[in-house]
Image (cartoon, helix red, strand yellow):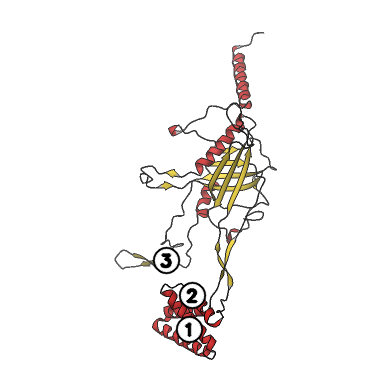
Amino acid sequence: MAIPPSGKTEMIAANRARAAANRNTNGKKDPPTRGKGGVEKTDNTLRYPYAMLDDNTDYLRIQIATYQPPRLNLSDEKTGILGKEIIKNEGKKNEVKYNEINTNFSLKTGSNVNAPSLKNPKQTIILPIPQQLSDNTSVSWGDAGLSPIEAFGVSAAANTIENGLEGLLASLAQGSDAFKALSLDPKLQGAVIAALSGRAVGALGGNVSGSQLVSRATGQVFNPNLELLFDGVNIRSFPFSFEFFPRNLKEADQVKRIIRSLKMSMSARKGPAGAGGGGIFISAPDVFQLTYMKGRKPHPFLNTFLPMALTSVNVVYTGSNTYSTFHDGTPTHMRMDLTFKELNPVYFEDYTDDIPGVGY
């Protein structure tokens, strides 16, 4: 039976579609599209393994966005150090002065400034959750002491700053009364003299402390009033290790694009002549938002991350300690080690109700 021309055309189109599908199934990729300058364009979303995700799939989502600087503005009305004062002049233009201390001073943080752009990332990478997971939260506390002589010096300085010469004279009078009280015991009197002498010698460049002289003279030392005091906050760092075993050409291509994208995103940019000062400056690399996911939602238990910078990428192309590749040159086993560091420390106020699981 003869096939009508219209049917023959449809059959040819169907055969071509099946052939194209078979080529894609066998792992042959379409020719890559290229942007300006011949740079190969990458997909908006890359993933390994190249498999379907469902609501029970746990994975690590990495979102990439262009870094936005916090932009220091000390005279900002809401967050700057100097508050705005507007002086109204009748018949003239109002005068603006920045001469008040803003009690609401708070510098913008890189985490807050970059959060909006990371919600609409320019690229997303999906990777399996690594086998070794941990988070380390720490703050700094340090030993600190304040001897009686140091306490007297602090009090005298504060009194002088607050009340001028009268405050200094009052502090000296108080010190004199205290010295007279100690004079009942010759050893205590000698300790005070030794401490003050050590301060004077130290001020002249000598390598002698008041405590050393007190110990030599009396066999005693001043009570240091030693305490453990809060010293500051720390910024968290997260290392990750991923193993790649490409099963076909499609996964091999995804692995190559993932490695390339991460290396490019963590690299600084040379400013063009028009916008970057003719090579005088270089621009910051991209920033990253990592999220442990379960299906389409954040993981209900694992920790949350602030926006981060990628500080290190280390790729081992011989993951099994043996050089082995597929016919197209793709290594059969690779290991990629990444180190991320958050842009800001984690504070108490960051633990809001919308942060799931264990928080940060």
Q: Is residue 353 visible?
A: yes
Q: Earlier in the sequence, mark 2 or mark 1?
A: 1
Residue 144 - label: none
Rendered image: mark on residue 193: 1
* Amino acid type of the residue that numbered disc 2 sits on in the rendered structure: Ser
Q: Nearer the viewer, mark 2 or mark 3?
A: 2
Tag 3 secondary structure: strand
| The quarter of the displayed image where residue 13 is located | top right
Decide if residue 37 is on the left or right side of residue 231: left
Q: Residues within 10 Å of mark 3 (few under 14, many from 20)?
A: many
Q: Residue 323 appears at what percent x and percent y?
A: 60, 32
Badge 2 or badge 3: first in the primary sequence: 3
Furthest-left residue in this view: 91
Q: Which residue is mark 2?
A: 209
Q: Position of residue 96 (x, y in %)?
A: 35, 64
Disc 1 is placed on an element classified as helix
**What's the residue at 61%, 14% (across, down)?**
8
Residue 199 placement (x, y as % from top left) = 46, 77
To which quarter of the image does residue 47 belong?
A: top right
Q: Looking at the image, tell me whether mark 3 or mark 1 is earlier in sequence order.
A: 3
Amino acid type indicated by mark 1: Ile
Residue 357 figure quarter: bottom right
As drawn, the residue found furthest toward the front would be: 216
Residue 232 lies, in percent from the top left, at 54, 64
Residue that numbered label 3 is attached to: 83
The answer to whether residue 191 is above or below residue 244 is below
Type of amino acid at the residue the image marks with label 3: Gly
